[in-house]
Amino acid sequence: MELKAKDTYRIQVQDFLSPLLNSSLLSLYQPIIGPYATLLYLTLINEGIHQRSLENHGRLCEILNVNIVDLYKARCKLEEFNLINSYVKTSDDRCSYIYNINYPLSPDSFFKNELFIKLLIRSIGTKQFELTASKLINNKANLEDYKNISSKMRDDEIATLKLDEIKINKVRPKYSFINQDNIKFDYDRFFKKISALVFPIELRTETNLKIIGEIACLNGISVDEMIILVGNSIDFQKKEFNIEYLKKAAAKISNGKLNTKDIYQSSPIAFLQAKQNGVEIASSDRMILESLAYKHGLSNEVINTLIEYVLKINQNRLIYNFVDKIASEWIRDGVKTREEALKACNKDNNKKGNKPMRIMPEYHQQNDDDTDRDALLAKLKKEFNNG
């Protein structure tokens, strides 16, 4: 697959190399994979540790001072030696890559790999191989005849120390890439187009990113629209993100357009609105949909299937407690897809007492014989005359 400078990437890496693994990379791997691949590997680690948003491959070309073809060749060399695993997602105008960084083998493990040994000898020759091996093979000193005389801190000194709790006032979290099945929001495009001036780095927490995706899915908000809404929801002086404002602003511009390819993938707002012939949904119904999305974390296809099911069995009425009860049961059953939701519907249909109990006035809950009815009417008439 042809690599382009505009293609974006994100890097998954745990930490910098330890001194031991760094020695393994430079002394053992570098002679085999070459300087470009080695430098690319170290650069990817550094970029991944500090990454805050998506970048394009043009940045890597500029950092390494190489063209896109050489960059691609260096990446392939890293893949061949399992130093990275590459994943790609294609779209109309670009590709998006994920690079998962693997650590080099330790020197001890490297020297147990016959293929790697042969490749290293072919690259640097037997003499240099023996010199490298003598430096890196573990050669611990024999301490059998030696006595440990190292000084230690006394227990009474440790007891006198007062360790103050460190309070962190401002956290700059590492960019967290959301990967949840219930959120069908294009985070790649979102971070490619939004700047740190509009959405400050320190506010890009996993919680904030999750709710942004959920709000977008529920209301059918596009990436471009969400960028504007997010920018308007931030207090730049206080560096605070007003989630409630974002929810209200998104509700005002909810998209009532159905997904023609799969109506159950449509935003629940649009789906319910279509169920009532395009009439705007009531605030109480919106509250139910918001609960299913924000509280229960259900996907659009599951929410829409649930809503359709409740309308069918409950005379086109949505009752919060009844919907909430079914949603809770589905979550306990692990329902995550429309297929699983349909199975849950069939399971519910086989139960007795499925329909919600209507909460009736007290006088409707009395015995239904004629005597009680006459007595009740007399009581109501008396109260009316006195009233």
Image (cartoon, rainbow, N blue to C red):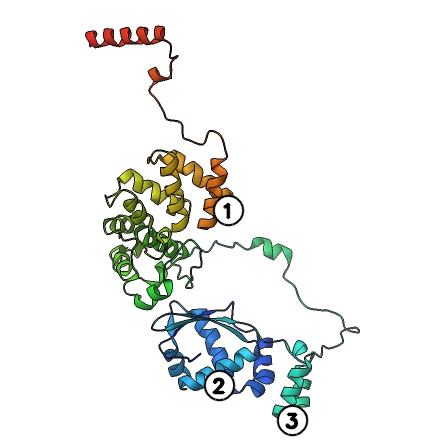
Badge number at residue 36: 2
Q: Residue at x 40, y 27 (%)?
A: 357
- Left of 336 or right of it: where is 217? left
Residue 36, position as x, y percentages in the image:
48, 86
Find numbered disc 3 in the image and state the secondary structure of the residue it sits on: helix
Find numbered disc 2 in the image and state the secondary structure of the residue it sits on: helix
**Location of mark 1 (residue):** 334
Of 12 and 339, which appears nearest the observer? Answer: 339
Determine the CA span between mark 2 and mark 3: 21 Å
Residue 203, position as x, y percentages in the image:
35, 58
Amino acid carrying label 1: it is Gly
**Location of mark 3 (residue):** 125
Q: In which quarter of the image is the C terminus?
A: top left
Mark 1, other Cα within 10 Å: few <14 / some 14–19 / many ≥20? few
Of 169 and 98, which appears nearest the observer? Answer: 98
Q: Residue at x 41, y 69 (%)?
A: 51
Find numbered disc 1 in the image and state the secondary structure of the residue it sits on: loop
Q: Compared to 142, does 153 lie above or below?
A: above
Q: Which residue is drawn at 32% across and 6% down?
A: 375
First in sequence: mark 2 or mark 3? 2
Of 58 and 380, which appears nearest the observer? Answer: 380
Do we see residue 336 in this rendering?
no
Amino acid carrying label 2: it is Tyr
First in sequence: mark 2 or mark 1? 2
Residue 332, position as x, y percentages in the image:
50, 42
Callout in the foreground (1, 3): 1
Determine the CA span between mark 1 and mark 3: 59 Å
